[in-house]
Image (spheres, helix red, strand yellow):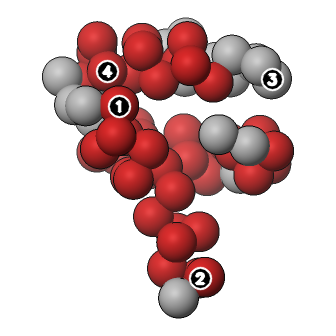
Amino acid sequence: MSLQLKGNWNQIKGKLKQKYASLTDDDLKFQEGQEDEILGLLQEKTGESIEKLREFIFEDENEKAN
């Protein structure tokens, strides 16, 4: 993950909460340098693979690039 994540985190957090209603604000607290930790937590809470979560988080950026 990159600085894009930090800059867009509020938007990403909203998307994650829409898709995974069981996530709480505490689950989605992002701190710079903690990308792997938050992905691990999201994987544990949602049951999704880390790769699928990465794709979901970055899908808007990927669509803009194409």
Label 4 SS: helix
Q: Residues within 10 Å of mark 2 (few under 14, many from 20)?
A: few
Q: Residue at x 59, y 68 (%)?
A: 61
Image vertical order of residue 63 relative to residue 49, above or below: below
Q: Are marks 3 and 4 in contact (CB under 8 Å)?
A: no
Q: Please, what is the three-letter code of the amino acid marked with disc 3?
A: Glu
Judging by the rendered image, the residue that carries numbered circle 3 is 32
Which of pointers 1 and 3 lies earlier in the amino acid sequence? 3
Image location of residue 62, percent across then percent down = 52, 72
Mark 1 and mark 4 in contact (Cβ < 8 Å)?
yes
Return the residue at label 1.
50
Label 3 vs label 4: CA separation? 19 Å
Q: Earlier in the sequence, mark 4 or mark 1?
A: 4
- Element under disc 2: helix
Alpha-carbon distance for marks 4 and 1? 6 Å
Give amino acid for label 4.
Answer: Gln
- The spot of residue 52 in percent (x, y) is 29, 44
Q: Image point 56% across, 47% down: which residue?
A: 12
Q: Is residue 18 above or below residue 44?
A: below
